[in-house]
């Protein structure tokens, strides 16, 4: 319970369903990231993502099936070594934060994206047609994207 309300829980899993996890509590702000790394990692026009506190996250199954890739000096991406599904990101400079792609989540997600970020490197073939704010890079600062709301 938090403030007299039960904490929300959502689960996530990879495509082959070997790896599963649980998130307890609210997600941080949700963003559609159009950077070239997110596009390549997800094979899509953008990655819809949020941050959570590491204490909100736990693996339920398949942790031994994880593999990782250091996509930059600061960011490590985790994915299933069987099916390749993107799972989470961790940050060397903020070990208390985990980045989560919303595409792998199941359950009632509160809210929706608040902005498109890194539109300066979006796919040329994709047109953003909604009215969300757009940022060429970070939405003011990197810390806004890493906010956990926890």
Image (cartoon, rainbow, N blue to C red):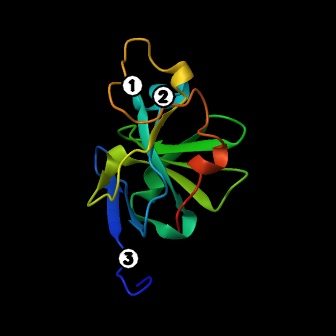
Q: Quadrant of residue 82?
A: top left
How far is disc 2 from disc 3 in space, using C-alphas?
31 Å
Task: Check if mark 2's residue and mark 1's residue have beta carbons within 8 Å.
Answer: yes
How many residues crowd around disc 1 within 10 Å: few (fewer than 14), some, or many (20 or more)? many
Residue 27, given in percent of the width and then of the height, sits at 44, 60
Against 101, residue 10 (above or below) is below
* Kind of element beneath mark 1: loop
Percent of width and height locating residue 30: 44, 48
Residue that sits furthest to the top in the current view:
124
Q: Residue at x 69, y 55 (%)?
A: 94
The number of discs equals 3
The reply, left or right, for residue 129 in relation to residue 3 is left
Q: Report the residue marked by disc 2.
A: 34
In the depicted structure, whether residue 35 falls above or below residue 110: above
The residue labelled by disc 1 is 45
135 lies left or right of 84: right
Helix or strand or loop: what does disc 2 sit on?
loop
């Amino acid at each position: 319970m938090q403030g007299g309300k039960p904490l929300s829980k959502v689960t996530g899993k990879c495509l082959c369903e070997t790896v599963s996890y649980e998130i307890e509590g609210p997600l941080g702000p949700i963003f559609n990231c159009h950077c070239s790394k997110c596009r390549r990692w997800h094979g899509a026009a953008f990655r819809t993502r949020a941050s959570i506190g590491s204490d909100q996250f736990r693996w339920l199954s398949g942790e031994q099936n994880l593999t990782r890739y250091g996509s930059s000096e600061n960011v490590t991406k985790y994915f299933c070594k069987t099916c390749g599904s993107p799972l989470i990101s961790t940050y060397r400079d903020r070990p208390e934060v985990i980045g989560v792609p919303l595409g792998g989540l199941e359950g009632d997600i509160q809210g929706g994206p608040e902005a498109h970020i890194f539109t300066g490197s979006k796919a040329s073939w994709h047109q953003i047609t909604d009215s969300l704010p757009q940022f060429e890079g970070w939405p003011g600062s990197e810390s806004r994207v890493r906010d956990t709301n926890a």
